Image (tube, rainbow, N blue to C red):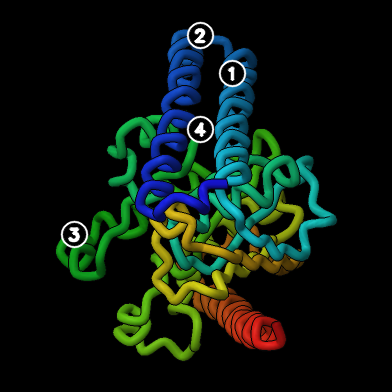
Amino acid sequence: MLNFLPSSVTGVILLLLFSLNTILCCTILFLFVFIKLIIPHTWIRHQFSRLLIFIATVWIEGNSFILRITQKIKWDVQGIEHLTSKRSYLVVSNHRSWTDIFVLQHIFKHRIPFLKFFLKKELIWVPILGVAWWALDFPFLKRYSRQFLEKHPELRGKDMETTRKNCEKFKKYPVSVMNFLEGTRFDFQKHKKQNSPYRHLLLPKAGGVALVFSSMGDYLSNIIDVTIVYPENEPPVHFWDLLAGNIPCITVRVKILPIPANIVGMNYEEDEAFREKIQQWVNQLWQEKDHRIETIMTEYVASTTKH
């Protein structure tokens, strides 16, 4: 534990340790990526893809080990007991911080298949990690604004087409497709700007999850609904808070949900009935999640007050 050090020093040490772990694992990863690219045999390339995921899992293990030996975080996790790495899942979650990614990787490692996140196309230029995400078949999305599409209607639906192709890749082996429905990290300024009806959440976006349902709903076993709360940290929660040891408690609640019926092959943009069905499903999910966060916060305050 580094609790005896100033938080700024702790943060720098953890950043260095995470960076060294990332550089080491990515160096090995890139070596096998190069070999995979020059091998034409499909079956062998598939085995190399499995090897790349194994290397990425070692990276996650390294990050978890670093946190375990340097931080004293109280983990309160419920609902992960009946998961398996042999099935494919859609994982949906609220989004509080970049720390959420470390949290999800930490609690789900070896319990479900390797998490594949939907990423903005611009993130492919992130040093080292961008290439690693590309090598691991993370789906990169290019989002077009409504104003841009009005000027370039020929590009309408292009982002959905790209996502559908990425989802087709995931049918080759068990996978966990990760989607932050809010599309961005929560803070009160965004919450006010959106005039969100939820107390603890931004407005959810149903298009991405609808596309996953449509493309591979028959391949998914379940939906994993994740609620992440940092009870002692006011949003926004920054990644530096994790590095500096300023996140004393992380609460996670996991619910396993069934896949909605009659969703495969449906078109979210053109089928009004399907679009309304998914939006209602997402809104109901978000109402329950908002209530769950409120309950977690209330119970946490009550428990700390007693002590």
Q: Is mark 3 on a helix, strand or loop?
A: loop
> Are circles 4 and 3 on residues that touch, CB within 8 Å?
no
Identify the image quadrant of residue 259: bottom right
Between 264 and 38, the one nearer to me in the picture: 38
In front of the other: 154 or 57 = 57
Q: Mark 3 points at which residue?
A: 152
Task: Name the residue located 58 percent from the left edge and 26 percent from the top edge.
Answer: 55
Q: Position of residue 256 (x, y in %)?
A: 76, 64
- Placement of 124 over or under 71, stated as above or below: above
Q: Label 2, on which residue?
A: 39
Q: Between 244 and 144, which is closer to the camera in this rendering?
A: 244
Pick the quarter of the image with the C terminus: bottom right
Instruction: Identify the residue at the far right of this view.
Output: 82
Residue where numbered disc 4 is placed: 136
* Res. 161 visible in picture: no
Measure how far apart labels 3 and 1 are at the Cα level: 39 Å
77 to 271, vertically: above or below: above
- Left or right relative to 63: residue 79: right
Q: Distance between the residues labelled 4 and 1?
A: 10 Å
